[in-house]
Image: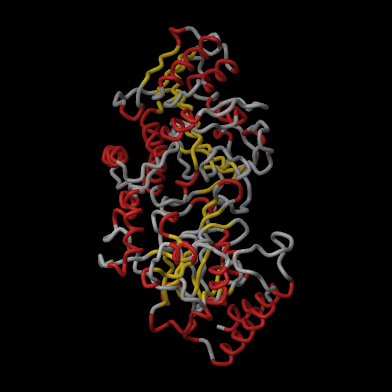
Amino acid sequence: MIVPCEDKVDPPLENPDTKAKEKALGQFFTPSALVSPMLEWVSETKAALEGKKIKILDPGTGEGIFFQEFQEHFPKLDSEFHGWEIDPILHEKCIQNLEKAGISKNRFHLVLGDFLQNEKKENYDIILCNPPYLRLSHSKHGKKLIRQFAEDIKEEIPGTANLYVFFLLRILRLLGPGGRASILVPYEFLNAGYGVPIKKAIIQSGYLRRILILDSSWSLFTGAVTSSCILFLENSRDSEEGFLWSRTSSFIKGESIELSEMVWRKIRPDAEAKWTRLLSDDSEPVQNIKNDDKNSPNNNYVTMSEDNRHGWVPIKEFGSFRRGIATGDNGYFLLSEKDASNLSIPKNYLRSSIPKAQYALSPFFTGDDWNTLKSQGAKVWLLDAKEVPNTNEQEGINKYLEEGIKRGVPKRFLPSKRKPWHSQENRGPCRILATSFHRAEVRFVFNQSPAVHLTCFHGFSAKPEYAHFEEYLFAYLITPHVRKELESRTREYAQGLRKVEPGDLNSLLVPDFRKLKEAEKEKIGKLLHNYRNMIRPWTPGRRQKGEKGIRNPEEEAILKNIETEFLTGL
C-alpha cells in the first residue's frame, strides 16, 4: 500500500531494511492533505445521510490514517472499521493508533493478510484506499492475479498491469448500494495499454463520478516516476453517462483541497482512448458543485478532436516509429573507447550507439558528433557479440563474457530472452529519432551517423520505397503544429516529466509527401538548410548555455514557415 504519514520537518533516518521492505510491498508515503477531499466525498454516502450504521473498508490500512481521520472528522457517526494489512509491523502499528484515537476494539476488525486473496463477498458503505504501487513484470504472482481477475471481468489483462489495478477491480465488487469510495492511484493506467480493460470495468460498473488529477507538483511516490489521481466512486443509479473531472493546478502542494471549491468539467470518454489527453481540454466547466445529485444536465461532453485534413495520410503510410534497443544491463553492455581497448575487445563485436538523449541535444546528429563523444570517454560502444569463437585471437571478448556470467548478466530478464545472451536486437540506425521522455516537448533528431539508438529515443523505420521522403517528414515533425499535437498525446508523470510512446507518434497524420511538387520540395529543403545553419554550435554531450525553455525567435520563424508550406501547400 501507499503508506500515508504526516509531513515532518526532521524525518528520521531511513533504515535500509525498511526501505527494501517498502519497495518489495509497493509502499509509498503520501501527503495527509489528500485525506481531506477523500473524506469529504465519502461523508455523503447514503447510510451516513440516513443516520444508519456505516461499514468502512480500507484494503491496505498502513498505519490507519484514514480510520483515524474519519473518526476525528465524524465522531458522532455510528461506524465500524474493517481493514486489511499484509505487513505485520504496520498491522500492529495500526491497532495501536486506532486505540489512541479512541476507537474501541469492538468497532474495528483488522486482518493481517493479503486483501486480494480474500474471496468473501461483503458490501461496504465507505471504501478508502491507497493501494500498493508495484510493477509485477510478468511474475508468477502477477500471472496468478491476471488469471483470477481476467475471469472475473471477462476481459484479457496484459502482463504489464500494476498491482494497484487489482485492488481497484476488487473494490468495484465490494461497494454496497448507495456506498461511496475514494481511491488514490497512479494515473498511468488512464493512458497505458493495461488500463483499457480496467477502464472498461469502471465504465461498465457505472460507479465513477469524478476524477481529480493531482498535477505533477504533487509528487506522491518517492522513487517512482508517476503522477496520481483520486477516483471518486458511488454505487447509485445514474442515467447520465460520463463523469466529472478537475485538476489541482489551483492548489499549492500541501494545501488542503476542498471538492466544493474545484471547477469540474463533464466528459464521456471511450475506454480505448488515452484519457489524460482528454482531461486537459479547456471545455466549458460545469458549475462549482458539491453533490452530484444537484448537478444540472450538461451535454457538452469533451471528445477527442478529429483531424480531417483533406489529402493527409497516417504516418504509417511511410513507415513507423519503434522503441530503441533495450540491453537489459547498460552497465555491462555499454563501453567507452578506453574500456574496449583495455579489455581487448575487437571492433567487430561493437556497434556505435546513442545511449542517452543528452548526447544528441541538437536537431542534427552526425558521425563527427559521435566521434566527439567517443573521444570524450563517453560509453557509446554497444557490445553486440552474436557469434564468438573460442580462440586465442578472441581471448579478450571471451574473458569479458565470462565476467558477465559471474555478474549474473545472462540471468537478467532481457539478456535471458536473447540467444546468445550477449547479442542485441537486430536493429539498424534510424535517421529520425524522437525522445521517449521529455519535460518541455518531444525533441526530434535527424541522425546522419551510423549509430543505433537505445531506449532514450524512438526511431522511425521508413519503408524502403519511401526512404527518400525522410528529410521532408523530419521537416514536418519539428514544426510547432506537431509540437502542439503531441502535447495532448503524451503521458504525464511526476515533476513535469512526460513520456511519448511509439504508438502516440504512429497515430499522427502527416502530409502526403508523394504529392509534393518539385518547387515545394525545393522550398522546404532550403528552409530546412537555413534552419540548420542558424542553430547555435554545440558540443555533443554537453547542455547548451542559455535560458532553459527559451527558443530563438529566428529559428521559430523558420519552423513556422516550414509549417505553412505543409499546411497550405498540399
Residue in the image at 36% along x and 32% along y: 170
- Residue 147: image location, x then y, percent: 26, 41
Please state the horizontal and vertical placement of residue 306, each as a whole percent of the image. 51, 65
Q: Quadrant of the C terminus?
A: bottom right
| Residue in front for this viewpoint, 421 or 525 | 421
Q: Quadrant of the N terminus?
A: top left
Label tally: 0
One can see residue 554 in this view: yes
Q: Residue at x 29, y 55 (%)?
A: 417
Relative to 210, does residue 538 appear above or below in the rendering?
below
- Residue 132: x and y in percent read 44, 34
- Name the quadrant containing residue 332: bottom left
Q: Residue furthest bottom?
A: 518
Q: Is residue 158 visible in the rendered structure shown here? A: no
Q: Residue at x 39, y 49 (%)?
A: 196
Q: Nearer the viewer, residue 120 or 223?
A: 223
Give the percent coordinates (x, y) of residue 298: 56, 46
Give the color scheme: rainbow, by chain, secondary structure or one colour.
secondary structure
Placement of 109 over or under 295, stated as above or below:
above
368 vs 23, nearest the viewer: 368
